[in-house]
């Protein structure tokens, strides 16, 4: 039964990764920015989600507060900084690194250095039992949230006008501008949505893994691994990559703890060498 | 990568030849500003040589050793990004791996000579892995590959505890006996810095360096000229990696200690910060950047709690407003003054800020 438990653990971790990686991959697909501040958005979202839901006693309120705060921050970063270096790859990445330094330090200032976790009272409680196997509902809840959001993203992207604009923006920016779409605001909107997804990931994920200084880099690297394996810009790729990495990580940590990081990064190195565009990515 | 033509706001920059104007030695009117450079270098050299006699205490001298080691490491990053346009987020891990090599040898009870051998072997192997994995990438993809390999090394350092002692790290790594005093070690580090800077300068002046700049500015053009671009990149990475390994060995001898933190991505990010603060592609930039960052990290941090915030803001401002970094901006300023006096030919060769501009504003080709 240990294996069944680990499969669910791996899926739950994969679900958190998906919330994180989907935002990163959408932003990359449209804007060609590797947003290094994505981990910082996750961390800030996690802290605000924890504090507000502890104060209000309601996870949904905390979630909304986290999304709102991080969305505002992302809006400021996009309009106030990134617009000035649009189309210049390295300055874009480097600016988001600078933003990470600033956000992480402000978080340390406000929330302190102790690890913080989502209070148990606001989490979906209890556990279920099948035979002699018991598992907390919270893991299932995380998987459910990620699945709902993943399906919603896929539907918006393939079935709505907004989704059509985004897909067109990925394929050919000039033509879509010529058709009267203000691509600058599409970029801003996508950046804000991506950050909001990170905030959701942070708040929900804080119920399983504490938020503390340094977590911003760790989750960012996991998310990068996921989107490189899945293919940059692909939601389906992010989903598959998240599940694969979530499972590998949990099993490796149990059975070969000495090589646990190695097992996550080795598949990525292999993908980069053999199929650089990722499993679901389009050829560059 | 999308076609540069579809970029929303393409930055127009004057087309440079294969060897961009302003690269030392390529322009006739450049010698004047090169005198400035030589004077600056001489000043740094003399101050560095006299430092232990300038009424400094062991803390200052030891801190200067830390700065010089960071500067060597930053030079190795600066070489790759300035000449080859390859911004690496993995050099901290190369230095860390070399430090672990020496640490592991010392853990086996081997002598200092074997520490050097093992550190060198580890450096060569690790650099080669980086080089081969990244040789067909450029720009943002290069950055991600180096980041990923760096994380791999961090993972091994922190988890593979039978070899690395895990998160406790390896301590009591002894350095050669004749370097046991803080000031003898300082001179050793200073010598290493001078040698590393000189070696990188020579490589930069060589035909190999010129080919690298050609690859930086237009990979496709160099390929059609018959250069095997990928192997040039491997060569550049190996040179840079060996210098980074040297810095790693020096740092483990300096602190007698190595832990996973020294291979972490934060280290590598700080290296990029140093290079850009100092000025991409400049000779003295890495030293300036390393000085600023290490002082903020070690000195300012004891007075101000929010030093990371300050570092982040400084970094953002530099990228937005002073791409050329400190060294590049000074060169720019000097040239502007000179041009106003009419002593430099208008439109004459420009300076090191070209490297920063070429790297930072270049669109993927």
Image: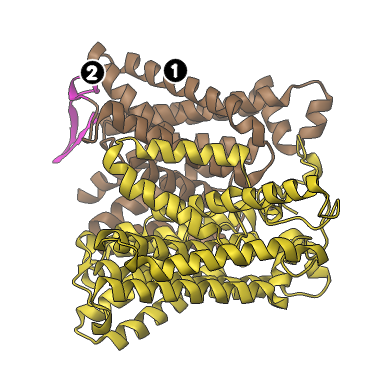
Please state which of residues B310 and B34 is positioned toward the viewer in this rendering: B34
Q: Chain of mark 1?
A: A
Which residue: 37% across, 56% down?
B264
Left/right of residue B299 with respect to residue A197 in the rendered view? left
Residue B177 placed where, x, y %? 23, 83
User: Could you say whether the residue bearing mark 2 is in a helix, strand or loop?
Assistant: helix
Q: Residue B260: horizontal and vertical position, in percent?
A: 30, 60
Identify the colour of chain B in the image: yellow
- Residue on which the image places disc 2: A54
The reply to whether the magenta stretch includes residue B275 is no
**Residue beneath the point at 33% across and 67% down:** B52
Q: Is residue A179 above or below residue B107?
A: above
Q: Which chain is brown?
A: A
Q: Which residue is mark 1?
A: A68
Query: In x, y percent, where is residue B45?
Result: 49, 69
> Which one is earlier in the sequence, the residue at label 1 or at label 2?
2
Q: Which residues are magenta?
A: A119-137
């Amino acid at each position: 039964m240990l294996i069944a438990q680990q499969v669910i653990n791996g899926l739950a971790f994969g679900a958190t990764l998906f919330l994180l990686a989907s935002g990163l991959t959408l932003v990359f697909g449209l804007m060609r920015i590797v947003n290094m501040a994505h981990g910082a958005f996750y961390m800030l979202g996690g802290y605000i989600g924890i504090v507000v839901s502890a104060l209000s006693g309601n996870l949904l309120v905390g979630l909304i507060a986290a999304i709102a705060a991080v969305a505002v921050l992302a809006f400021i970063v996009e309009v106030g900084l990134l617009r000035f270096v649009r189309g210049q790859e390295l300055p874009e990445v480097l600016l988001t690194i600078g933003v990470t330094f600033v956000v992480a330090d402000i978080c340390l200032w406000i929330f302190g250095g102790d690890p913080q976790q989502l209070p148990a009272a606001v989490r979906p409680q209890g556990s279920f039992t099948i035979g002699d196997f018991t598992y907390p509902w919270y893991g299932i809840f995380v998987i459910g949230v990620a699945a709902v959001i993943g399906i919603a993203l896929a539907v918006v992207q393939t079935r709505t006008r907004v989704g059509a604009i985004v897909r067109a923006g990925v394929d050919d920016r000039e033509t879509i501008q010529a058709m009267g779409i203000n691509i600058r605001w599409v970029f801003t909107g996508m950046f804000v949505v991506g950050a909001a997804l990170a905030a959701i990931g942070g708040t929900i994920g804080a119920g399983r893994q504490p938020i503390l200084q340094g977590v911003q880099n760790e989750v960012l690297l996991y998310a990068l691994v996921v989107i490189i394996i899945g293919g940059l810009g692909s939601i389906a790729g992010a989903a598959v990559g998240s599940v694969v990495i979530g499972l590998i990580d949990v099993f490796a940590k149990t059975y070969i703890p000495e090589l646990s990081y190695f097992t996550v990064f080795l598949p990525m190195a292999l993908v980069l060498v053999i199929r650089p565009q990722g499993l679901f990515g389009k050829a560059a | 990568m999308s076609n540069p033509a579809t970029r929303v706001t393409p930055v127009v920059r004057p087309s440079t030849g294969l060897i961009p104007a302003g690269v030392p030695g390529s322009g006739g009117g450049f010698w004047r500003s090169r005198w400035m450079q030589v004077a600056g270098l001489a000043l740094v050299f003399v101050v560095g040589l006299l430092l232990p006699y300038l009424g400094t205490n062991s803390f200052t001298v030891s801190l200067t050793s830390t700065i010089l080691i960071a500067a060597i490491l930053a030079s190795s990053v600066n070489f790759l990004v300035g000449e080859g346009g390859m911004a690496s987020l993995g050099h901290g891990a190369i230095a860390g791996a070399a430090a672990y090599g020496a640490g592991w040898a010392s853990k086996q009870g081997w002598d200092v000579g074997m520490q050097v051998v093992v550190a060198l072997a580890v450096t060569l192997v690790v650099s080669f892995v980086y080089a081969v994995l990244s040789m067909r990438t450029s720009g943002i993809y290069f950055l991600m590959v180096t980041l990923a390999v760096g994380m791999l090394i961090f993972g091994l350092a922190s988890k593979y505890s039978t070899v690395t002692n895990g998160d406790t790290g390896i301590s009591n790594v002894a350095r050669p006996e004749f370097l046991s005093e803080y000031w003898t070690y300082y001179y050793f580090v200073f010598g290493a810095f001078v040698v590393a800077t000189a070696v990188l300068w020579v490589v930069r002046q060589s035909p190999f360096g010129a080919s690298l700049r050609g690859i930086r500015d237009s990979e496709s053009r160099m390929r059609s000229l018959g250069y095997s671009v990928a192997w040039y990149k491997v060569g550049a990475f190996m040179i840079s990696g060996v210098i980074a390994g040297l810095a790693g060995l020096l740092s483990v001898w300096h602190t007698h200690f190595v832990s996973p933190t020294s291979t972490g991505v934060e280290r590598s990010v700080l290296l990029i910060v140093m290079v850009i603060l100092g000025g991409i592609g400049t000779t003295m930039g890495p030293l300036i950047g390393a000085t600023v960052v290490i002082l903020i990290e070690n000195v300012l941090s004891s007075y101000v709690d929010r030093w990371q915030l300050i570092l982040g803001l400084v970094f953002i401002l530099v990228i937005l407003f002073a791409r050329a970094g400190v060294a590049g901006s000074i060169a720019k300023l000097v040239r502007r003054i000179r041009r106003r006096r009419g002593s430099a030919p208008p439109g004459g060769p420009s300076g090191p800020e070209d490297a920063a501009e070429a790297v930072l504003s270049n669109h993927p080709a």
